[in-house]
Amino acid sequence: MNNINYDLHIHTEHCGHAKGTTVEKILQRADEMNLQTICIADHIYSPKEMSIPAKIKEQVNAAPNTKCRILVGAEIDVNGLYFDGRLVCPIPENLDYIIAGVHFIPGPGHYPWKIEDNTIGPDAFLERYHSTLAGVLSNDQIDALAHPARMPGTALNLDVYFDAVLEILRDVAPLAAKNKILWEINEHDKDKAPPEYHDKWYKIYEIALEAGVKLVYGSDAHFVDEIGRIEFVSKVLEKLPKGCLNEGIDFKIR
């Protein structure tokens, strides 16, 4: 089991689907897990959520002292109505860490819970996914790309299109390297990626490493007991070069 002493992707109850996950409980859990650095990066799905990070900062400042370093960032979504990688809003000022989240099918703008939800078909999806990632990874204001292949993992039949997804990632990875955008190994992918592809998920990060992209861990925790969990992440790392994951607080922090 890998010893990872940070967690750079934690949500709170402010996101609307993490009931009971308060800032105070997050900080208590971080100390219990002996984490040295955490980032609370809640969802911003639209401009109306831009005030959430400021609320979290207030709650962090009001919380009891903790042993770990606390970063406040945001997981800002890519605008699903377009396929050029633009974010749903300008990046709020004074945040420590910006994660770009690609959750919605480019164009129709809805979340694909299953293959049938991909209403534009696989060819259009792949083309738009490609241009979306290229746009996201050209934005040097972004620090990390959340769960790089999660959406195609639900929207496509990977038995047919997994290699095509990898080729897209291979094409855009140099942009991430150029703009120093980390690729996140995300624990929550164990619940999103098809189970038969769990053993192949490392190939996504092989591509990143070949292009000079650095890797970072995030639990994507929505509930307190998920913070710092690395069961799936450890299995991915077993098939990657030792020491390939960013350690400690060696991150591109604003």
Image: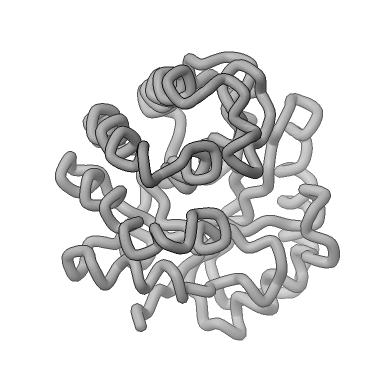
For the point 54% across and 37% down, the residue is 155
For the N terminus, the quadrant is bottom left
Up the image or down, 74 lies above or below 205; here it is above
Judging depth in this view, the residue of 165 and 172 nearest the camera is 165
Up the image or down, 47 lies above or below 99; here it is above
- State left or right for residue 152 relative to residue 61: left
Judging depth in this view, the residue of 19 and 72 nearest the camera is 19
* Quarter of the image where one finds residue 24: bottom right
Percent x, y of residue 79: 61, 22
Residue 254 in sight here: no
- State left or right for residue 36 relative to residue 110: left
Judging depth in this view, the residue of 20 and 156 nearest the camera is 156
Judging depth in this view, the residue of 84 and 46 nearest the camera is 84
- State left or right for residue 222 relative to residue 30: right
Percent x, y of residue 248: 36, 67
- State left or right for residue 216 relative to residue 90: left
Percent x, y of residue 45: 71, 33
